[in-house]
Amino acid sequence: MDPTGRRTGEAPEPKLAEVLLKQVNDARELTNSKQHVARGIKITPKYFKDCLDCLRGAVTIAFPEGLPEYDEVRQLLLGDWECDGRTMEMFEAGEAELWWAGKQMEQGQERALRDYVGRNDKTKVIAKLQRRGGGAPAGEPPVDEQTQRDMMAFWHKKQEEAKRLAEEDEDAHLGAAWADPRQLRSHLQGTGGVRWR
């Protein structure tokens, strides 16, 4: 059952479900940026329009009577879908800026990403979309959340250990037998067990 309570849970027939899955996989391949980079093909809005047309056709085949008006798939395919708390903010093409490494990538120029980043294909690029005129977006944290937790646990453990050592007397070890400077001499002379009254 759909957690939003909007869907009835009626799935299409298995053959029609295969058609839907095939179109989804074809759309993923069509929009796969790694393949486009390897072939040197630019991704244009036409590619995305072709994907949407194929998906619309598959949904029409799977649900010939049509989807209900409240169905999110129908809203997405018709362009009536509005972002909500489950999705990130949507930008129109003219009101967004792409930022990388604290620098704005110029829009509308015939520059490739390699002009900004370089030709190293193993470089990891984290680019962010920002509303036009909003300035540079916040940077990525230097460490991920799990590493941050591990570092805090290690720091807390070290702090507790330092506190415990500070509470102990600094000269407490001087009374121990292993700290006696005359121990070796008395052991070699055989006078280790002699006590004076």
Image (tube, rainbow, N blue to C red):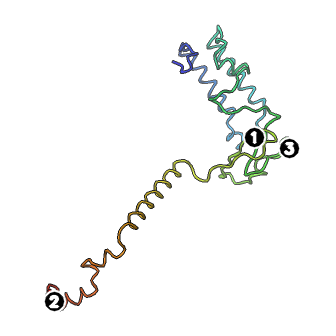
Callout 2, which amino acid?
Thr
Give the CA separation, mark 1 to mark 3. Answer: 18 Å
Q: Give the percent coordinates (x, y) of residue 151.
A: 50, 55
Q: Are marks 3 and 2 in contact (CB under 8 Å)?
A: no
Residue receiving disc 1: 130
Q: Are marks 2 and 1 in contact (CB under 8 Å)?
A: no
Give the CA separation, mark 2 to mark 1. Answer: 83 Å
Q: Nearer the viewer, mark 3 or mark 2?
A: 2
**Within 10 Å of the Cα at label 1, are there few (<14), some (14-19), or many (20+) other Cα atoms?**
some
- Farthest residue toward the right? 109
Please tell me which of labels 2 and 1 falls first in the chain: 1
Q: Are marks 1 and 3 in contact (CB under 8 Å)?
A: no
| Circle 3 SS class | loop
Residue 133, compared with residue 88, is above or below; it is below
Please tell me which of labels 3 and 2 falls first in the chain: 3
Give the CA separation, mark 3 to mark 2. Answer: 93 Å
Whether residue 145 sits left or right of residue 137 in the image: it is left
Residue receiving disc 3: 109
Q: Give the percent coordinates (x, y) of residue 85.
A: 64, 29
Q: Which mark is residue 191?
A: 2
Quarter of the image with the C terminus is: bottom left
